Amino acid sequence: MNKIFQPAQQDQTNLVQAFAEAMKITSAEITQKGTGVPVGPYVHGPGGIFGVLGLERDIISTHTQMTGSLGEVLPIQASPDTNPYFPYITGFLGVASPWKDDVCDQPISGGPFKTCIQTTQFGRAEYKTRELEVNAVGQQINRGEFMDLRVVNSPLVNQMSGLMAGFLGMSNQQAGLAGNEFVMRMIEVGVAFQRWLCPTVFTGNPANNSAGGGYKEFPGLDLLIGTNKIDALAGTACPSLYSDVKSFGFREVDSAVDPDLVRVITTMMRILKSRANQQNLSPVQWAFVMRDEMFYAITEIWPCRYITYRCSNIDGDNVDPVGSYSVETMFRMKNEMRDGSYLLVDNLKIPVIIDNCITEENHADHEAVSAGCFTSDIYIVPLTARGGSLRTLYWEHFDYRTNLLPSISGLPAYFWSDGGVFLWTILTPHVWCIDAAAKVEPRLILRTPQLAGRLTDVVYCPLQHTNDPLPTQDYFVNGGISTGRPFPSPYSEWNTRGPG
C-alpha cells in the first residue's frame, strides 16, 4: 500500500490519520529508528503541561512571532535544478577600429557582447518531533480535566510565503490545537522551521554547510546584495551586476553630518531607478526592509528632513528663505508613513517591510555604537520589474511532490506536506515509542542584484526595545515551564504520603 500522503490544508485531523496510516508497518520496512525514550511533557494526563483540573478553555499564546517578515511576502515556485545557471548580457565592447575611408571599403564591426552566468544552491534543514509513547496519547487525570482547550491566537502564522503558509494546515486553526498531542508536537517543529528560515533570508551562507551535507544554507541577502559578483563558470568579475552597497558609518538616523540619512537613501534610490531605466527594466517595484525600531526612528526625522531637503543647511541655516513649515503637515506625514508602512522618496511611496530577524548589534559588538543604541542594515529589494511581468525576488524549493514521489511510491512511512515543500517520515517505532522527522530544501532567488541596495551600519536609539522573535536575540522573552505539572498523588494503600 502506498503510504505517501498530503495532509489536507484545512483539516488538521487528516494529519493524525496520515500518521496512523503510516504507522501500519513492520520494523523491517524502515531502516530509521527512534531512541525508544519518550520525551515529555505531554499535553494531558498525569504530569501533562495542561494536566490541571478546572482549566479555562481559552489559551492565550505570548510567543513572539516573526510577523511581517520579508520572506512572508515573497512568491514561491518549485524547481528540480540543484545548480541552476542564470544568464546575463553584461555589456558590449567598444569599437576601436577607425571609420572606413572609401565608400567601397568594408565597414567596421560592432563590438561583441559580454555575458555573465550566476548560480545558487538549495539550503537544507531538518527537525524532528519529540518522541512520544503512543499509549500516553489521550490520557487524562480524571473527569475534572477538560479536553476541549483551544488556543485563541495560534503560535503559527503564515510565514515564509508558501514555505510556511498554513504549515500542515494548522496555521490559525484554533480549536483542538492544545488538545491534540500529535498536533502540538508538529507545531513545535513548525516554530523551529520558522526560526531557521526567517534570519537565514539575510545571513544564509553556504560556508556554514556541514561537511557531510546534512545541513545547508542557501545564499541570503547579505551575499546576494553585494559587490562581488563573478561568473559561475569563469570566475570573472561582473561589475554590471554589483548592487549599491553603502555604509552610514555608525551614525545615528538623525545625524547632522552631511550627507544625512534622507540624502543617502534618496541618492541610492535615484541610482537604482536610473539603472532600471537604462537597462529597460522599469517600472520596478522596490521595497525597504528594516527592523521595527529602525523604521520608527527614521519616521521621527523623515518628514522634517524631507520637506526641508536642500532648502536649508543640515544645521538649520537657510540657504534660500522659504517661509515657515507646517508642523501639522509634518506630523500628518509621519503618521501616514507609519500607518501605511512606507517612506516617501522623490514623491514615491516605497513600501517598508518590517523584519525583526535582521541582525542587530549594540555597544558590546561595536564601540562606535553608543550604549543604549543599536545598529542594523536597511535593505532595498526589487520585488518585480517591467511592470510586474518579471519576478526578481522569490523563493524556490525542491518539490517532493512531483520529483520525489514517483521514485519512492513503493516505500512506506513517507509523505509530503504544504504542496511538496516538506518531506516527512515516521521513524521506526521502538516498541511503544514513535517520532517523526521533516526536512525542507529552499533557496532565495534574486535575479536583478544590480537593482538592489543595502545601507549598513545605521544607528538608532529607542527609549525601549521591543521583544525579539528569536531565542538567540538579546530581547527574546518567554518564561514559564516546560517540564510538566506535578503528578497527582492521592492517599492510597500504596501511597501514605498523600497529595504533594
Image (cartoon, rainbow, N blue to C red):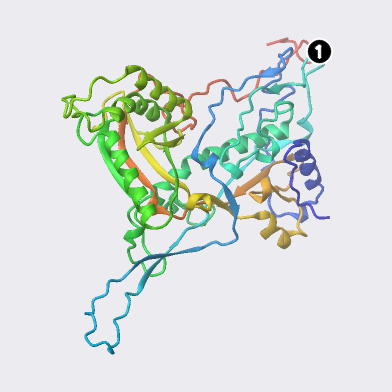
Q: In this orientation, does residue 365 appear?
A: no
Tag 1 secondary structure: loop
The residue lying at 34 percent from left, 62 percent from top is 238
Residue closest to the far right:
1
The residue lying at 36 percent from left, 58 percent from top is 241
- Which amino acid type is shown beneath numbered disc 1? Glu
Q: Is residue 358 left or right of residue 437?
A: left
Compared with 461, 342 (above or below) is below
Q: Is residue 486 left or right of residue 135?
A: left
Q: Nearer the viewer, residue 26 or 338?
A: 338
- Quadrant for the C terminus, please: top right
Give the image location of residue 322, x and y in percent: 22, 25
Residue closest to the far bottom:
104
- Quadrant for the N terminus, please: bottom right
Give the image location of residue 423, x and y in percent: 66, 50
Question: Which of the 4 quarters of the picture holds residue 432?
Answer: top right
Give the image location of residue 36, x and y in percent: 69, 41
Give the image location of residue 279, x and y in percent: 39, 58
Question: Which of the 4 quarters of the picture holds residue 253?
Answer: top left
Q: Is residue 490 left or right of residue 355?
A: right
Q: Is residue 496 left or right of residue 194?
A: right
The residue lying at 71 percent from left, 14 percent from top is 55
Q: Nearer the viewer, residue 348 or 212?
A: 348
Q: Which residue is mark 1?
A: 493
For label 1, count other residues whose C-alpha is less than 10 Å away and answer few (under 14), some (14-19) or many (20+): few
